[in-house]
Amino acid sequence: MLIDVDRHVAVSRYQDLFPHMTLSWQKHFEREEWIGSAAVASDHVRVSDRLRHDPEPSPSSPPDGSVQLLLPHQGLTVNGWADHVAARSFLAALNGYAQATWSSPTSRPVVVLSPFDVEWSVEEIARHDDADIPAVALPLAGPMLGSDRWSPIFATCQERDIPVVVHFSGVEGRYLGAPPLSGGAHASAYSRLTLMPHLAESTIASLAFEGAFARFPRLQILVTGFGFTWLPSLLWRLDREWRTFRHDVPWVTTPPSDAVLTSLWFSTWPVAEAADPRQWEDTFTDRLRGRVLYGSHAPHGGDGVADILRVLGADWPARLELNSQAALPRLHTVVA
Amino acid sequence: MSPTIHHDRPPLVDCDVHPMLPRAEAVFPYLSASWRRHFEAHGTRLYARARDRYNHPNRTHRLDAVPSDGGPAGSDRELTVRSHVTPYGISAAVLLPQEPYGITTWSDAAAAAAFTSATNAYFEDEWVAYDPRFTLAVTVTSHDPAAAAAEIRRRGRDAGVVAVQLLLAEQMLGSRWFDPIYEAATELGLPIIYHQSGNEGCYTTSQGPAGGIPRSYGERHVVLTQVGAANLVDLVVGGAFERFPGLRIVMVEWGFSWLTSLLARMDHLWTTDPAAAPLVRRLPSAYVSEHVTFTTQPLDETDTVQELEALFALPGIDSMLLFSSDYPHYDTDDPDFVLKRIPRSMRDRVCYENAVATFGERILAARG
């Protein structure tokens, strides 16, 4: 059973969330511009300059028979919101809607947490845990993920064996307050999408050097939507800087690459960037191969299993299947 | 003094050697009276990294590069020759003055231009004229592109000048802001050297890594390479190589192991949707291999021979790598250590052939 860990879903009409809100919050959100922003919020994840996009199809049984970990990506875009309190209410409604609407025998939505309210996020995990949520998604905002600020969320996830999904929302490097991308200001969406893996790199460096892996040794984090071919270079740099400055971070007692290969998972999209195996295969150890998951990124021009076969070769689908069962035991159990 | 060439290896060009001023006042003779009075009265800040924000856990320099009679590491030209240039058989060292890195944090563009120019003049007189193996990257900051272009034209034809060191603040390299600088540099056939200044991730006016604020020096150092990569992307996306077909960029101290995945991603995304980057007219990687070179330091410390070989698997990398040591910094790469790790088939290119292609024959021309 192959699990697609990067399948996106979106609400086409924000009014559909109203039944999952209190009346006062409904009144707050009953405003033309917010209701009209559903498509905008859904398009961010495409990181595109295009002004028109095809509507997203509703999730259905995938043609390749995979099981889907659904990511309500509009929820991720709260990392660009100015009103952090409203963001929390939006996420609560979105999570309620998602569990009621998109759960199926072959798909489960993640619960999206608020990066602005750790305490509420912990409560939100508890609120949904009975539904066997397969994972939670934490939009990137505020201190980087290695910070102790996130410990209550990580402790809860570790205790309940719930993996954390980290995926860009698409407003990074664009909206004030959302995490920046590398360099300066990038007007071009092409530049931002090209540089998006740096967001994953920095998140991993933060987790490693701030000791999060040591504090939560059983926590599993899925870093999805960023590809995977950049990993060897990052791991060499992580270990080199740790060797040089390990006296400065005494809480990191083992090479960071070890923790990365124990605690993190990565996904395949966009697999076509790995089209020339001569450029990455020799640096990709067996341990690294054991941490890659299938992620289609559908329906945003995503990759099918046929693309994986064509680019990575015949032995990869079986490997990805094994990996995804290890990464998402809850989802595997629920749909098995 | 003539170049020293070890017989057991090809000529070696070290593309990243930092000379230092013995003290800020050393450049005062090269300033006008009014600027001299200005700096005497106001002082100067000549380091870029916010040291109260990211303090280096040890020291940024090698202790054996500190002159016995005082002054900062790298400020004694004779010591640099005796302990680095001659022992390693370095035929040419590209000097990248470091004090102007701090000038990137100044707000006064006129003061920045005056002090940077005086620094260039000092190193021409005191280092380049001292030993023909010393060559200079004329240094300019991004404050005032017209002033920077004038400085390039003022010194770009001088003996021993082989490049322009362009120091950045918030503007990225693909911006048209830099067109006057690129115009002057290409007019004189000088490549642009882009080296991190230390301001990265420190100020509202500087560039930084993705994601947010790294907590420690080492964590920041892991992701500092991203700033170089971002500017490389910006050069391509901004159409700089289309506007200046003769423009050559030398990326110094940004590493290069990240390049393979970055170029594959750029090419894939551009091929998927060329209209997303309207100033890009051909495969992004083609611009990079034609216009950009990268220095070796810090050479990544791979775990296996297979990984080491894979470091050099990028098609065309043999024409894109230049040797660098980063002397006298704490993480200086030992030439003997590094060159043993370069594939034998590439060694001549990395040692000097690519440097000649980048800087011209003048890089190895002994000047009496």
Image (cartoon, coloured by chain):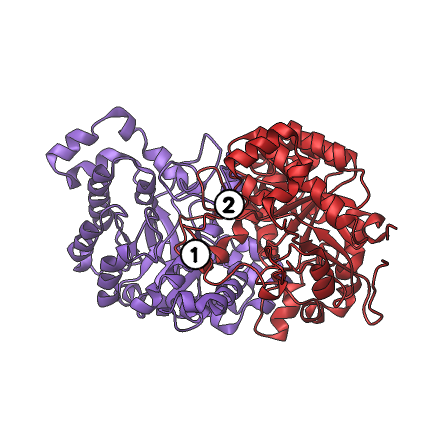
Chain colours: A purple, B red
Say what secondary structure mark 2 lies in.
Answer: loop
Numbered disc total: 2
Question: Residue B284, located in which quarter of the rendered image?
Answer: top right
Q: Type of residue at label 2?
A: Asn
Q: In the rendered image, which quarter is residue A276 located in?
A: bottom right
Residue B226: x percent and y percent? 52, 50
* Residue B345 image point, x, y percent: 78, 67
Judge from the rendering whether residue B329 lies leftward or rightward of residue A100; answer left or right: right
For the C terminus of chain A, the quadrant is bottom left
Q: Is residue B13 left or right of residue A135?
A: right
Kindly tell me whether residue B312 is visible in this rendering: yes
| Residue A295 disc label | 1
**Mark carried by residue B199:** 2
The chain letter under disc 1 is: A
Look at the numbered disc 1 and give the secondary structure of its residue.
loop
Q: Is B65 in front, or is B193?
A: B65
The amino acid at mark 1 is Gly
Q: Nearer the viewer, residue A79 or B293?
A: B293
